[in-house]
Amino acid sequence: MYEPRHHRPLGRSAFIRRLASHATAVGGIVLLSLLIGMAGYHYFEGVPWIDAFLDAAMLLGGEGPVRAPQSSAGKLFAGSYALYSGLVFLVALAVLIAPIVHRVLHKFHWDEK
């Protein structure tokens, strides 16, 4: 996926395109996660879509739910979604910083010949 050590580091414009592609992938992951959370809150708690969006967005953003779930199924979903949201945060962060870390390490280890 990335250039090997013996290749010249990417130019600025190619690196920006790589960052943009990673940001697009993260945006897709976050959007899909938000839709999953909205569907779960709507199905298990019976809340309107706008309230499901608010609860899912708050959990995905690390703030916690706005209202406590009332049903047992809703509580199980909210707990599972909270754990999932924590993993999504870590994955999104890793995907976003991977090109930057690679570029820094590549510049340190690249041998100009």
Image: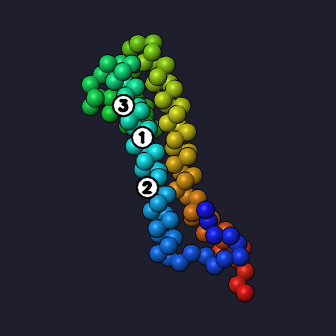
The residue indicated by pointer 1 is 32
Inter-mark Cα distance, 3 to 2: 21 Å
Circle nearer the N terminus (3, 2): 2
Residue 12 vertical placement versus 45 (above, below) = below
- Quarter of the image with the C terminus is bottom right
Residue 40: % across, % down: 40, 25
Residue 26 vertical placement versus 78 (above, below) = below
The residue indicated by pointer 2 is 24
Residue 54: % across, % down: 32, 33
Single out the residue that lies furthest toward the bottom: 113
The residue indicated by pointer 3 is 38
Q: Nearer the viewer, residue 99 or 7?
A: 7
Q: Residue at x 52, y 56 (%)?
A: 96
Could you say which disc has been placed on residue 106 in the image?
none
Residue 61 vertical placement versus 94 (above, below) = above
Q: Residue at x 41, y 13 (%)?
A: 71
Picture quadrant of residue 60: top left
Q: For mark 3, give the secondary structure.
A: helix
